[in-house]
Structures are given as C-alpha cells and as structure tokens.
Amino acid sequence: MKFGYFDDVQREYVIERPDTPYPWINYLGNEQFFSLISNTSGGYCFYRDARLMRLTRYRYNSVPTDAGGRYFYLRDGDDVWNPGWAPVKAKPDRYRCRHGLGYTVIESERNQLAARQLSFVPIGADCEVHRVTLKNQSGAAKEIKLFSFVEFCAWNAYDDMTNFQRNFNTGEVEIDGSAIYHKTEYRERRNHYAVFSVNAPIQGYDTDRESFLGLYNGFDRPDVVFNGKPGNSVASGWSPVGSHCLGVTLAPGEEKSYIFVLGYCENPEDQKWEAPGVINKEPARRLLDRFRTDRQVESAFDELKNYWQGLLSRFCLQSEDPKLDRMVSVWNQYQCMVTFNMSRSASYFESGIGRGMGFRDSTQDLLGFVHLIPSRAKARILDIAATQMEDGSAYHQYQPLTKRGNMEVGSGFNDDPLWLIFGVTAYLKETGDWSVLKESVPFDNDEKKSVSLLEHLRRSFGHVLHNLGPHGLPLIGRADWNDCLNLNCFSKKPGESFQTAENMESGVAESVFIAGMFVYIAPSYAEILRRGGFASEAEAVLKAAKNMEQAVIRYGWDGEWYLRAYDAMGNKVGSRECEEGKLFIEPQGFCAMAGIGMEKGLPERALDSVKEHLDTKYGIVLNWPSYTTYRLNLGEISSYPPGYKENGGIFCHNNPWISIAETMAGHGERAFEVYRRTCPAYLEDISEIHRTEPYVYAQMIAGRDAPRFGEAKNSWLTGTAAWTFYDVSQFILGIRPQFDGLQIDPCVPSWFKGFTVTRRFRGAEYVIEVRNPDGVEKGIKTMTLDGTPIMGNLLPDCADGKTHRVVAVMG
Ligand code: GLC
Ligand code: GLC
C-alpha cells in the first residue's frame, strides 16, 4: 500500500495522508543550522550540534508519537485545526505534504480555508523559515486567528530532559514587538540566544508553556487557542515557549501570508547587552531583515533550489527504470548529504544526544558524498584524522561542536583505522588532489603532535599489522564493523554498554572481516605510496596483503564460505561447525570484494553460499541462523531477539558489499537483484509493511526470524546511503573514479538495454551513453570520446570545463 508518490519533476515525495505508518521526515539545512521536520510538522532544530546547541524541544518515545514541533493553530470560528494535522488532528478536507530537497511544504484545507506551510533553512542563514499562506476559498469573509507555537530547549538537550531541579528555575525570555527571544543561561556563560518572530503585528503572545497549554493539557488542546485569546505570558523558569497570536481577516478568495523565522544568534562576549539585563538584539534584527518579505523568501527559496540543482547535476542517470533513476539521481544522493551532515547523531531513531560523529561512520559517508562537495569532504577527512591516536587507533566518535574525540561509545574497534585510508582513497580518486596527503594533522587534537595526513594513513595500516593474532589475522579488539560482535567483552552486568564495558583484550580473538578489508584496501594504499615516492614501502604493503590473503585462505575459509572470526578462546565464529551463527555476511562481502582466493574460486563459492543461506525476499540477513540465546563470548549480537538488528536482521548497510562482489564476479543480474531488494523506491508499494520512508534507506529491516519480517527501523542515518550509492554508481552503472580518470565498467542485468549518466568529474562534464545491444552483463567492447575511439575503458581527465560525449558499447 502506498501513502504518496514520487513527483520526479519537482524532486519531491508527496505524502497524501497525514497518518503515515511512521512519521516520514525530512531534513532542512546543510551548513550550520539543521532541522528535522515530519509530515505533520513535528521535529526540532539545532545549531551545529544536536546535543549541545538545541533550539527547540522534542519528546522522544512519546504518546502520541512525534510530539513537539513548530505548530500552527488555526482558529476559524470555533473550529481549531493545524495545517499539518497534528497535534489537534482535526481532519483536513485536503492534505498534501511535499518533502523536497531541503524543504517541506504542507498544503491542506478545511472548511474552505486553505493553508500552505513552506518550511526551509535558507543557504547561509542560521534559521528556519516557515511561510504560512492562508486563503479563503469560501464565498464569505473569514475572521481567523493564527497561533504559532514552538517549545524552547535549554540548549543542552541532555540536561534539558534530566536536570529539572535546575531547569525549572533558569528559563528566561524577552519580548520585543513581534519577536520572542529565548535567553535561558544568557545571563551567565552563554553568548547566544534564539529568536522566534513573525513579519506582522501581533495581537498578543505567550512564552510560558503552562499558560499556553494549561498544565493538564497536551499540544492538542492548548487553552489559549481554544479560548481564542493570547495570554501575554512571560516565562519565568519552568518551560519557555514561543507563540504569536495573529488576527487574520480574509475576504472571499483573499490570500495572505506570514513569515515566521526561528533563528540562532550569537554576540561577541563584550557586546552581549543592549542595556543592563537586555540582550543585544542586533544579530537578530539583521537576520530577521533578510526574511521580511515574500520576495526575500522566494529568492532564498530559489537559491536553495538552485543549490540542489547544481549538486545533483554532478551525477544524473537516465534509464528505462524510473525507480532507479529517482533513487540514483535524487534521493540516494540527498540521503548521502544528510548522513554526511548528521553522521549518526540526530534522527527519529537517534536522539541527537548519545552519538556524535562516528570515526568509522563518517569516513564511510564520504563514499557517497565526495563527488557532491569535495572541499567539504576534505575538511571532514582532516577533522576525523585529527581525532586519531598516535598508535593509529581511534576514538569511536567525536562531538561535532568541539571536534574532539570522546569515549562515550568507546574505542579499540580495530577496523576503525582502516576506514580512514578508505575515505582518503575515495577523495583522491574523485579529485586527484594529492596535496591533501601533505596536510599537517594532529593526533588526538594535540597540535604539538602533528604529522602529515599520509603519516596518519601509515599509522592506520600499521595498527592492523601491529595487532595480529595467533592465525596471523587481525585482532578484533572491542569489535570490528559489527559493533555488536564483542568477542573480548564477557559482559554479565545487566544494562552495561557493550561499547564501553571493560574489554578483556584476549590477544586471541581475530576478525576475518578486518582481514578482508585490509586486503581490499591495500592495492589503493600501495598506489598512494608509490605515487608519493615510497616505492619500497608500497611493495611492503602489497606483501603484507599477500600474507594476509594467505592467512585467510588457510585459517579463514570454512569450506563453503569465509569464516567470521575466532573468539577469545580461539573457537570459530561463523562456521558450519557452529550450532548458530554459521554464516555471516560481512566477510563474504569484503573478502570477495578483495578477491581472496580468487584462483580457487572462493569468492564465487562464498557468494553462492550467501544466496543459498542468507537471501530473503526483503534482502540479505546478516547472519544465519540467528542466535536464540545470549552468548557471553559473542556479546551484544546475541542480545537482540532473532531477526533484529545485528542478529539476523537485514542490515542494509552490508547488502551492497555483496552486490559489489557480484559485479566483480560479472553477475549483473544478481548484483542488481541485491540492490533492488532493499532499495526504498521499490518498496513503496508495501509501505504498510516496510513502514519507514519510501525515499530513504533504513539501517535495518527485520529479518525472516523476526515476527515482523520486512519491517524497517532506523531510517536516514545509516552507512547504507553511501554504500548503496557507491555500489550502484560505481559498480552496477560502473562510472568509477580512478586515480587517473573515470573508468566505465558497468555490470548490469542482461535485459538492461542501456542508460545515460551525466557526470561532472574534475572540471569537465561527461555525458556517458552506455549501450548494451548484445544483452551482456559486463564488458565494454568499444568506447568513443567525442566521436574518437579510445583504447580500453578509462576516460582521460579532460579538465577543460567543457561537456564531452562518451559512447560505451557493452559486449
Ligand atoms: C551501526 C553503526 C555502524 C556499525 C553498524 C553495525 O550502523 O553506526 O558503525 O558498523 O551499526 O554494527
Ligand atoms: C548498538 C547498535 C549498533 C550500533 C552501536 C553503536 O550496538 O546495535 O548498530 O552501531 O550500538 O552505538
């Protein structure tokens, strides 16, 4: 069942009813100011850091779900409703929510009053703009009252929801005309405040939650709105809110719009006050002046649209399949931008409090983002590398505001260092900017310990080599990519975090996954060294990879698939000898991608085993059989009921590894099938089962061992976004950046007749037409660049700012 449709021309997902199977959200903002907004206008916003600088409050795990947002209440006679349906939930006669790229439009109508709410975060402004347009569709004049509402957060979102004995006393506001200022803690160490304003005179306001709602009421029944009269309340402690009351008179057919701005402002330390106790409103006035008129809002909105138009013109697909086109050309790239911005911090499944920017997560996000804005990818690489330790190991996360690593989700995940090499390789292949390797980057944010980025890569690679176990395979440490395979943890304490519990480093537990990753990365890393003038070091890297490959063939092959690991007792994990957890997806993906044991046909054998044992109609499960009991020697993985998350769930993130490996084996049809199964646009018709947004990937879909097989959770912030884009763009469509240019190497189902990709790459544009007259799955027979045949399938760097036509014929 569908709850909306894709508008491919506008690049919007149009939701046709407000009661979607789960809140279907969108993200606003790309730079410093970010908002989450659901199809009923729920959500919240923050400046740079969802934990430390949160402007508005949001209630997690609330009933009803999705409580807290920017709400507009319309009082039309005695009838009260919201354009976004929630929170009053009076049924609109018409409702549409259009989630677009960086904006959301909610259009609805009730009793012949039409309302349209356009919400976006303008480029270069630290605010969200909501323009509310009201139109009288009836034959009689209407007297309407429009109430706005937001609830402020006392900045630190964690304290805000825990430290009430303090918070209930600190709340402060100022009101100046139509502008409401939230200034909690400004009197002491903060030099920032929030402003919520409207570009019209108001009849009154409210800033105290209890006065606005009534102590025992929910957002669905605010006293002030139902009484039709603002309370002009001034918050003093308790919970500051912002609400304007506007009187709107509309003649038949008349339309009026109001521009609400909710923004973040900062003053220099010595200019905090206008007068004693009165905040300096200069930055707020400057901000509000930019969005006073419809013309200003429209031009800011156009700017946003052009911004996305420009970004998405860097990779654009036209094929016979509209689902594929819209995912590849629009939604997958859009999600890659969001994961790049948010890492795993703020979504409807991530509170914005617990997890900041992941070392592993953010480096992987680069794979799907680097072609969009390479300069930001570079800055991110340098930020991440600066949190690395001298021995090559890493904090698992850092806080976006401070950019410092912290131990909140631990460290000692022994795959982390390698992802840095992976991310830097992707950047180099996209840009050809070799100078990045010479950048000076500290360890652990200590400027005194600065070395070149290349040296950071050395430490990464070295970290694996210095931590090998009894079989010559990499020690797993706390865990590898699978945060939940905790082989050295032995946690018995209820509720203890597997990420930070004391790790009994055994010196025995080894990861075949890290081995596969090491071998996969080595050739590119060796090439980086060779080009940097370190030829013998490059040789040594390749030799180390050969040794690792041998170790996997000897000790990491289980007969029909690659083993997953050795536990702290040296017992096999992911072997047919095991009673549960016989087969795991991760090493099959990475070892096959690395071509380990190619001469003996091991990758193909492993892929067949995946197909035979792990594949389901909704995607490939992570492991089989799922663990049915808690295993002390395995940790968190066995804490999940069978079929969920890392225990037999369809963890979408590593499905593309299998798809990529299938392309390497030349299996276009199988590769595409793996891609298609988890791809949201293809799941739109079963939204009642899938439940999360049909325009973005979720981290996990419940596996076949779960009662709710096929149900997705944790949408938006997942490495799936980057990995699927990497898979579909570089391996299925085969438009693959290499150190020396763009390689064209598609691997598609034989029934693909062809496709065209427009790709901006290193200062030139290539319109690449791939034809498949013989219905093959892989192989380029001939290729021309601007009509001239070229040898092989690598396009040279034209770098001339021009558009070039490429025709590649498969066969
Ligand atoms: C989550 C984490 C990611 C990890 C994965 C598997 O998605 O963000 O870092 O690799 O789970 O445990
Ligand atoms: C939990 C989740 C996993 C995530 C990890 C890190 O273990 O299952 O997906 O990566 O937490 O916080």
Image (spheres, rainbow, N blue to C red):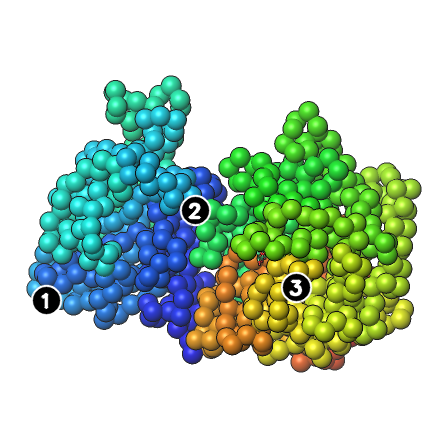
Q: Position of residue 489 (x, y in %)?
A: 67, 53
Q: Of tags 2 and 3, which is closer to the observer?
A: 3
Distance from the alpha carbon under mark 2 to that under mark 3: 41 Å
Q: Residue at x 61, y 59 (%)?
A: 636
What is the number of the mark on residue 139? 1
Residue 580 figure quarter:
bottom right
Residues 714 and 27: in front is 714
Q: In the rendered structure, which amino acid carries the disc numbered 3?
A: Arg
In this rendering, the answer to whether 730 lies above or below 703 is above
Instruction: State the residue position of label 3.
Output: 631
Q: Position of residue 95 (x, y in %)?
A: 29, 68
Instruction: State the residue position of label 2.
Output: 34
Which of the four quarters of the rendered structure image does ligand 1 lie in?
bottom right
Residues 365 and 60: in front is 60
Q: Position of residue 319 (x, y in %)?
A: 59, 71
- Mark 2 residue crowding within 10 angstroms, few (<14) / some (14–19) / many (20+): many
Q: In the rendered structure, which amino acid carries the disc numbered 1?
A: Gly
Left or right, 736 with respect to 197, comes to: right
Please indicate, yes or no, whether residue 786 appears anywhere in the rendered image: no
Residues 79 and 771: in front is 79
